[in-house]
Amino acid sequence: MKGQIIELQKATGNVYLETIADFKNVTKSKDVESNCISINFVNKGSNTVVVNGLKIAENQSFQISQPSACIDRTIYQVSFDSDGATSDLVIIRILPKNQS
């Protein structure tokens, strides 16, 4: 409105997004919901892990991170090749605290 002064209020509170770390072990093929800021797939078994078509060899990892305040909503398809003796995938997600 003409002639009216609007005062902007300063934001209060923590300027950092509060997060928690979530750890999962996957030993069988399954879909994994991300709903996180970052996700890290670590192959601790001897079988090759396949995540959405990407192969992750034994003792290798793959990480996806979003810009601050963005959430990844991908459903990852996890499967295992039969080229080793064990299937063990560690998934580490960083979640907004209110999504835990």
Image (spheres, rainbow, N blue to C red):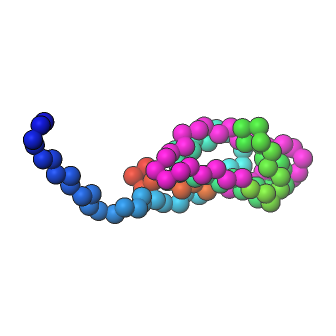
Residue 59 on image: x %, y %? 80, 60
Residue placed farthest to the left in the image?
A: 3
**Closer to the camera, 53 or 46?**
53
Q: Nearer the viewer, residue 23 or 2?
A: 2
Residue 67 among magenta residues:
yes
Give the vertical position of 24 relative to 55 (above or below): below
Return the residue nearer the eye: 81 or 72: 72
Q: Quadrant of residue 94?
A: bottom right
> Which residue sits at x=15%, y=47%?
6
In this rendering, does residue 96 appear at all? yes
Of the 4 image quadrants, the one containing the N terminus is: top left
- The answer to whether 84 appears left or right of 35 in the picture is right
Expressed as whole percent of the image width and height from the top left, the position of residue 33 reads 57, 41
Q: Residue furthest right?
A: 83
Q: Residue at x 20, y 55 (%)?
A: 9
Q: Is residue 18 magenta?
A: no
Count of numbered labels shown in the rendering: 0
Measured as percent of width and height from the top left, residue 48 is found at: 83, 48
| Left or right, 100 with reference to 3 | right
Q: Which residues are magenta?
A: 62-91
Indicate the position of residue 46 as horizontal and vertical percent values: 84, 55
State whether residue 84 is above or below residue 14: above
Please indicate, yes or no, whether residue 24 appears anywhere in the rendered image: no
Position of residue 58 in the picture relative to residue 51 (left or right): right
Tell me the quarter of the picture where residue 92 sits: bottom right
Q: At 46% across and 50% down in the image, what residue appears?
A: 69
